[in-house]
């Protein structure tokens, strides 16, 4: 059957044309296409990865911003609280000090008054004594036998003392 | 024709092929029946011999026959290149034979005998088989119909693929610009599907080395298959349905499989991992493995050849219904003509599918065989299971 017996002439032409096709395509055809397709694939993969990384970084930055904002707010609250405390403390201290100062002044004043009072009393005492001595002297200098005259004298002396 | 039928059945399992082979055989039987009836009825008319017609169309020819009006044949003459043992090289157009009716410089196309349809040379002197001359086959490198079609499709394929490659070459180093549209994108789609779905999984890690060969095989087969489906001049030749073509393709795969086979692959052949009594006194398993070595490419060769041949034959057979039913009356003829056209269109669509599938299968099996010859692990899959 001629269909099943390969013809040598056709074998030759087939070998030649397939050989040429194979040589040309394997050297200048498919490797270039396959290489470029691979390169493009690698490029796309790389781009996707880069996009993902950029996205991640963006998310990180956003998170960082949020965190910073949050921290700032906390800081603000804290500072305000601190300031409040400090103010209260200062006010308290000032009050305390004022009270203390006042108490001290009062105490000092009291002491001074006391001293002055004592001095006055002592002065009065001294004057009274001197007066008494004066009066006694005057009484002693007159002859005092008359009761009524004595009484009159005493009153006169006291009057004099008061005038002085 | 029975031989072809057997070949169709034995090594191949594809259902489509079986159905096709069966239809093909039925057709030939039906054709010959009608033919014999016809000769009974009207003896003087030139009878339509379907078997001859189909065989003539699917086999090679020295000129590219286009059509005939009565006795006028219109065909494209092709160069005949022969080397006679006695008179050396001769190159002349095939039109010198006047469609096989005349001899030229002692060469003529044999009408019967062992070299039927081939160029033979008459060498006088040695009487044999009751003749006073001997028919000798010269060295025949004629650019026959198949060879011419082969050359044309090869040039076409080179132009197509190189134009695509050129497109990429212009964008070398700029992968961000290399996203093609239109035809280049289509070729790229086919290439990437073959590389990613066939070559990579079948061969494994060394696949890059074999990619150019397998892609060339795929595109070579598919372009010849598709050109064969076009009924008029640039196509129509039964190239991939010719055993010489599939023989070379299978041979290339055979060479690549065995030349690049690993040490483990050869060990699996000559000293397979089976009980010792299967290999020591009588080398049973090695013998089977060695037979397997040759049956694999042989199956490749027959599969492609038989599929494409059967496809061509069935299309021709269906077309012949029109001419065979002329004698059955006008109504019958009209009905059968409509049926024939519908069936032919259907089968042509199937053939488009087959053109792709056969190219795919050839590439895939070549990749599988190459992959099997690259085994490194000890418990590699046995090669006979595949193919």
Image (tube, helix red, strand yellow):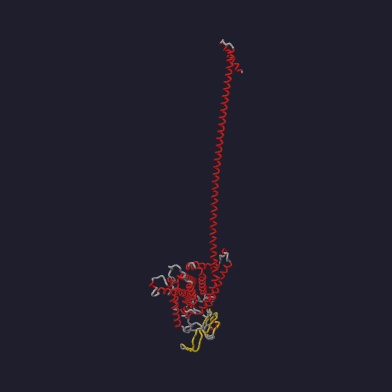
* Residue nearest the observer in this picture, B314 or B107: B107
Residue B145 at what x, y percent from top left?
A: 52, 78
At x 55%, y 33%, the residue is A100
Residue A115 at what x, y percent from top left?
A: 57, 26
Residue B306 at what x, y percent from top left?
A: 46, 75
Q: Residue furthest left?
A: B277
* Residue nearest the observer in this picture, B216 or B305: B216
In the rendered image, which quarter contains the C terminus of chain A?
A: top right
Q: Residue furthest top?
A: A146
Q: Is residue B84 above or below residue B248?
A: below
At x 40%, y 70%, the residue is B274
Question: Residue B181, located in which quarter of the rendered image?
Answer: bottom right
The count of marks equals 0
Q: Confirm whether residue B169 shows in the render.
A: yes
* Residue nearest the observer in this picture, A98 or A123: A123
Q: Confirm whether residue B315 shows in the render.
A: no
**Left or right of A57 in this view: B35:** left
Q: Residue furthest right?
A: A164
Q: Is residue A124 above or below residue A75?
A: above
Residue B369 at what x, y percent from top left?
A: 46, 71
At x 58%, y 64%, the residue is B174
């Amino acid at each position: 059957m001629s269909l099943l017996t390969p013809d040598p002439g056709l074998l030759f032409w087939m070998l030649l044309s397939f050989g040429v096709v194979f040589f040309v395509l394997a050297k200048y055809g498919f490797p270039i296409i396959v290489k470029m397709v691979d390169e493009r694939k690698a490029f796309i993969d790389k781009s996707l990865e880069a996009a993902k990384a950029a996205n991640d970084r963006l998310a990180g930055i956003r998170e960082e911003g949020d965190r910073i904002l949050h921290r700032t707010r906390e800081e603000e609250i804290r500072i305000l609280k601190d300031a409040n405390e400090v103010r209260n403390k200062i006010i308290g201290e000032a009050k305390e000090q004022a009270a203390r100062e006042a108490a001290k002044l009062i105490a000092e004043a009291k002491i001074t008054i006391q001293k002055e009072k004592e001095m006055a009393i002592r002065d009065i005492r001294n004057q009274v004594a001197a007066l008494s001595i004066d009066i006694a002297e005057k009484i002693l200098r007159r002859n005092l036998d008359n009761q009524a005259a004595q009484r009159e004298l005493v009153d006169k002396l006291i009057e004099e003392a008061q005038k002085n | 024709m029975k031989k072809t039928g057997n070949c169709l059945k034995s090594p191949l399992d594809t259902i489509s092929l079986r159905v096709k082979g069966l239809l093909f055989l039925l057709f030939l039987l039906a054709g010959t029946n009608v033919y014999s009836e016809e000769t009974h009825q009207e003896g003087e008319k030139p009878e339509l011999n379907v078997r001859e017609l189909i065989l003539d169309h699917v086999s090679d020819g020295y000129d590219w026959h286009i059509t005939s009006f009565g006795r006028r044949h219109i065909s494209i003459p092709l160069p005949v290149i022969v080397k006679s043992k006695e008179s050396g090289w001769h190159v002349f157009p095939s039109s010198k034979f006047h469609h096989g009716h005349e001899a030229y410089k002692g060469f003529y196309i044999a009408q019967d005998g062992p070299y039927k349809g081939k160029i033979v040379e008459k060498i006088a002197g040695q009487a044999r088989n009751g003749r006073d001359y001997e028919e000798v086959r010269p060295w025949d490198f004629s650019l026959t119909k198949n060879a011419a079609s082969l050359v044309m499709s090869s040039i076409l394929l080179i132009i197509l693929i190189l134009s695509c490659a050129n497109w990429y070459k212009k964008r070398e180093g700029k992968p961000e610009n290399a996203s093609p549209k239109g035809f280049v994108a289509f070729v790229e789609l086919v290439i990437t599907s073959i590389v990613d779905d066939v070559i990579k999984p079948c061969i494994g890690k060394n696949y890059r080395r074999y990619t150019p060969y397998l892609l060339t095989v795929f595109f070579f087969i598919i372009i010849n298959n598709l050109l064969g489906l076009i009924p008029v001049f640039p196509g129509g030749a039964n190239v991939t349905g010719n055993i010489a073509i599939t023989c070379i393709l299978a041979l290339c795969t055979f060479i690549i499989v065995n030349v690049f086979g690993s040490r483990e692959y050869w060990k699996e052949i000559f000293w397979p991992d089976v009980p010792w009594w299967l290999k020591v006194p009588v080398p049973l398993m090695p013998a089977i493995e060695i037979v397997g070595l040759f049956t694999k490419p042989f199956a490749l060769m027959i599969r492609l050849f038989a599929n494409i041949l059967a496809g061509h034959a069935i299309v021709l057979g269906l077309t012949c219904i029109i001419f065979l039913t002329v004698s059955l009356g006008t109504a019958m003829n009209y009905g059968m003509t409509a049926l024939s056209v519908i069936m032919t269109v259907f089968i042509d669509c199937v053939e488009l599918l087959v053109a792709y599938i056969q190219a795919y299968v050839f590439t895939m099996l070549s990749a599988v065989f190459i992959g099997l010859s690259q085994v490194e692990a000890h418990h590699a899959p046995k090669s006979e299971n595949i193919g």
